[in-house]
Amino acid sequence: MKLSNRVLNRTLLARQHLLERSTLTAHQMCEHLVGLQAQDVPPPFVGLWSRIADFDPATVSAALEDRSLVRITLMRGTIHLVTPPDALRIAPHIQPELEKIPFRKGFNFGAMVGLDPDEVRAHGEAALGEEPMSAADLRARAAELYPDRDAGAVLQTWLYQLPVLQTPPRGKWQDSSRPVWSRVQPWLGAPLDPSYPLAELLIRYLGAFGPASTMDMQTWSKLTGLKQAVDQLGARVRTYTDERGRTLYDLADAELADPDRPAPVRLLGWYDNALLAHQDRSRIVPENQAVVLRTSGLNVSSILIDGYLAGCYKLFPKGGVARMRISPNRTWTRTEHQEVETEARALLGFLEPAREPVVEILEPGADLKP
């Protein structure tokens, strides 16, 4: 069966809870989405606000404190907000790939080439110990141990080599404290679980991002050699083809969304999972907008209209004003203007409730800088 791009679009949005806000809790949403991209502090809060009705950001802050949610390096070598069970069972799949990165010639201009990876790792484990440690303190220890190497590169190497997570207050609502790192086992009181099958992880990926190709799964996870794991899915999946004839896998009992279902305007956080989880992003990023997505500047976030990337926005809070500047990727209709402005004001009320909201919708392609 061949699936149209629009079926793929609406199905992705439905599984991402972007067609209507959900009653799931933040913990349940993190489980369903297999984590939320959380390299910076605001994006997971925007992602949850866009997906959960009456989302209270204080629940995430409290969860980071009681350790029922954690920020850990996982897919694509980036920080994700996940539940502890997912941290313990996903990390063993991702960690071997992360550990290869620092000793390649392209890493920090070859800063670690020639060093023994096992020795570097042992020094990192000793430096980090059993208690959380700031990046500044870890960098100082790296400089002591490797005076002839770039201390920042050594620190980055340790953060790739060791299963680590960021501890609060970093990641709490409206708290951009500098990272403090902890090894996973001391923080969660449990070791990594290497028994979790890769096939189960792929099943969950399909539940949140499918139907998808093997290359989509690889792009999402940055894992290679997935064909064997996909073959093991057996009768749990069925296959489709897309408009270009590529094979797509999906859960055997999963429903496809109605392609005619309306898709409301959504403002996402930067690097939202929905935009990064496929090798072929055409189901959500129109082909002529791919370059715009790749070249977006720091903290520039995406706007979906009718389910597709249609512009970007950036916040400029200063003094008593929270200014949101919006750059459409195409000419919008009057209705689209109104719907975007309504959602933008709602988001400003969530992110900056104490400041006066100002929404500026610029000409298509305009620079977001004031």
Image (cartoon, grey):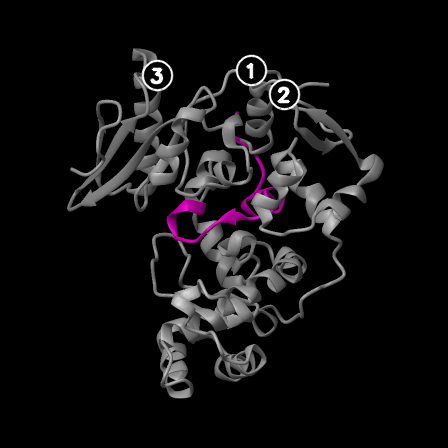
Q: Secondary structure at mark 2?
A: loop
Residue wearing tag 3: 336
Identify the magenta region: 18-44
Q: Secondary structure at mark 3?
A: helix
Residue closer to the observer: 325 or 17 = 325
Q: Measured from the top left, where is residue 118 in percent x and y?
A: 58, 80
* Kind of residue indicated by mark 2: Ala
Residue closer to the observer: 344 or 231 = 231
Residue wearing tag 1: 261
Q: Measured from the top left, where is residue 186 in percent x and y?
A: 58, 74
- Per the rendering, the mark at residue 257 is 2
Q: Is residue 125 left or right of residue 314?
A: right
Mark 2 Cα shell of 10 Å, populated few (<14), some (14-19), many (≥20):
some
Residue 146, quarter of picture: bottom left
* Kind of residue indicated by mark 3: Glu
Q: CA distance from mark 3 to mark 1?
A: 17 Å
Instruction: Compare marks 3 and 1 and give the one earlier in the sequence.
Output: 1
- Work out whether 47 lies above or below 154: above
Q: Measured from the top left, where is residue 163 in percent x and y?
A: 57, 68
Q: CA distance from mark 1 to mark 2?
A: 8 Å
* Kind of residue indicated by mark 1: Arg
Instruction: Compare marks 2 and 3 and give the one earlier in the sequence.
Output: 2
Decide whether residue 40 is among the magenta residues: yes
Question: Which residue lies at the image location 23% right of the left edge and 29% below the top edge?
Answer: 359
Q: Secondary structure at mark 1?
A: loop
Q: Are marks 3 and 1 in contact (CB under 8 Å)?
A: no
